[in-house]
Image (spheres, rainbow, N blue to C red):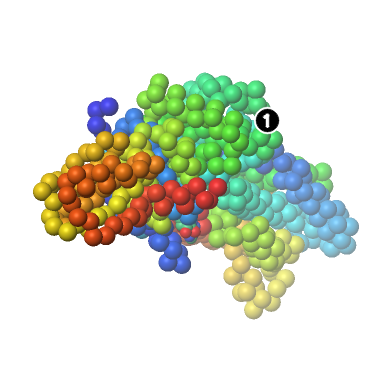
Amino acid sequence: MNGEKALIIHQLHKTYAGDVIALKQVDLEVEKGDFFALLGPNGAGKSTLIGILSSLVNKTSGQVHVFGHDIDKHPAAVRKMIGLVPQEFNFNVFESVANIVMTSAGYHGIKRSVAAERTERYLKLLDLWDKRSAAARTLSGGMKRRLMIARALVHEPGLLILDEPTAGVDIEIRRSMWDFLRKLNEEEGKTIILTTHYLEEAESLCRNVAVINHGEIIEQGSVARLLSRAMTQTFVFDIEQPAKATGHQALGDGIQLKFMDDQLEAEIPTGVPLDSVLDFLRKENIQVNSMRAKSNRLETFFLQLVDQD
Amino acid sequence: MLALNLTAFRTIVRKEIRRFMRIWVQTITPPAINALLYLVIFGGLIGSRISEMGGVSYLTFIMPGIIMMGIIMNSYANVSSSFFSGKFQRSIEEMLVSPVSNLTILLGFITGGVCRGLLVGFIVAVVALGFTQTVPAHPLITLLVATMASVVFSLGGLINAVLARSFDDISIIPNFVLTPLTYLGGIFFSIELLSGFWQAIAKLNPILYMINGFRFGILGSSDIPLLHTFVVLLLFILFLGSIAMRMLSTGKGIKG
Ligand SMILES: Nc1ncnc2c1ncn2[C@@H]1O[C@H](COP(=O)(O)OP(=O)(O)O)[C@@H](O)[C@H]1O
Ligand SMILES: [Mg+2]
């Protein structure tokens, strides 16, 4: 990775007709070669964000750069770089599978002979070659989704965007799609962004994640770091006199202490008992006046995601 | 986004032709049967009791207008239903996410509409040959008027589809505007039959200019100076074309 950004979003804002605010001043960066999840519940603004990236939704304000190209100044260059697999099926169901892929290649300016070769390659890759002459409406749900992936890859974009690719798909198909995407990212270095409301999907597939809720990015970073933060509880102790120690201190078992003037914050991984913190306080002769648990908004958020299913 | 993408243009035209050929029973046969009925009933049965109109037999007189009606209705129907069903099925998004310019999209759909319009016009003309053996007096003018009229109504169909929210919305204009205007546009009569006042009203109808221009191409005579036909056609193409381009560039009806 040379540090070039696949995507830079700056202060992106979207208000739909009827004053529905779907995105609030969103900032987001995705590295080239990354496998990135946009995680959030229904109505969070994921599809709106994807829509703006792929020219299906007009933004209200803000800037978007894809591989260095400004979406306002060079829309055609940006569209060449992006392959979109939308949330809803959006092909002509009366067309044949091969024609749908060929036509999309044609829209991208790819000559017919080249388009025919690539159509064969990608339909085979997605296990749809036998179905090439079938009308799209005769395909199963999983095949339709794969058809949209083949269509999104035919112009060989640097950035593949999938909007809830596995929503409502059964577990087996979901796993095989995961394998396919993982290979595409690892072996071909394709940058992939997917939106999902399954925490598990982000966890098992993606390196980095942005968490979106009510149109705002509330957290972004590596999936591992995010999970550990979500799985941590913070307790605040009000203490009698300032402790001798300052700054941060690790206590083992992943417990982190943070000293402030008359407060001590203890971050404790979910499931680890408080005992060692209490032992520490006793040993250091720190008098505690009161104690409370700090609410963890990531944990609250994830519980909300899980509730949804 | 004014650039013209040739490969993409060809792709759109090919897709449009494939669409109306796939459903040829719905797109090609009804206009041919319609024309046949008009020629049999108005031309053959009733026409034989009418002496002459515009210096030719009644059947011959109405033939160009019957062809033109097929061209107008089918150009309109092709673009309005193709574009609207693209909106409805969201397959229009395939174009919006690709680097195709709006001009290319517009020209692609219009060319598709012209192909269907002219194909239907040709088939109706062949049917008409069974009734009246007329060879176009001015083949190039005939083709030019037909093509330009087809462009006008293809543009109209596209604008209609952009504004439409349901399939009903794309049948309102053909049923309540195009059909009456076509009937009043001098297919079946020469406006010289009308009194001065009604003639002036009839001349407000743009379709009158197209039918008469087309009749001039085929029969060599017209109620309207040929130049007027071309001016009306050109103005409509420019006017509707700029509205359609504007709609595509703002994403009206197709973008969130
Ligand atoms: N075309 C639209 N017009 C008005 N509001 C919309 C439109 N599309 C989405 N919204 C609203 O914007 C918000 C975000 O929606 P969306 O981006 O689809 O979320 P997600 O994909 O995360 O489920 C929701 O409140 C939704 O109702
Ligand atoms: Mg969505």
Please state which of residues A185 and B203 is positioned toward the viewer in this rendering: A185
Eyeballing the image, is A26 above or below A106?
A: below
Q: Residue A125: x, y in percent?
A: 53, 22
Q: Amino acid at mark 1?
A: Ala
Please state which of residues B235 and A140 is positioned toward the viewer in this rendering: A140
What number of labels is visible? 1
Left or right, A234 with respect to A88, comes to: left
Q: Quadrant of residue B18?
A: top right
Please state which of residues A165 and A88 is positioned toward the viewer in this rendering: A165
Rate crowding at label 1 as few (under 14), some (14 to 19) or many (20 or more) other CA atoms within 10 Å: some
- Residue at position x 52%, y 33% from top? A149
Q: Is residue A149 visible?
A: yes
Left or right, B123 with respect to A194, comes to: right
Q: Residue A199: x, y in percent?
A: 45, 41
- Residue at position x 41%, y 52% from top? A300
Q: Is residue B147 visible?
A: no
Q: Residue B3: x, y in percent?
A: 39, 42
- Residue at position x 83%, y 62% from top? B51
Q: Which residue is mark 1?
A: A134
In terms of secondary structure, where does tag 1 sit? Answer: loop
Q: Disc 1: which chain?
A: A
Left or right, B18 with respect to A164, comes to: right
Q: Residue B168: x, y in percent?
A: 67, 61
Q: Quadrant of residue B126?
A: top right
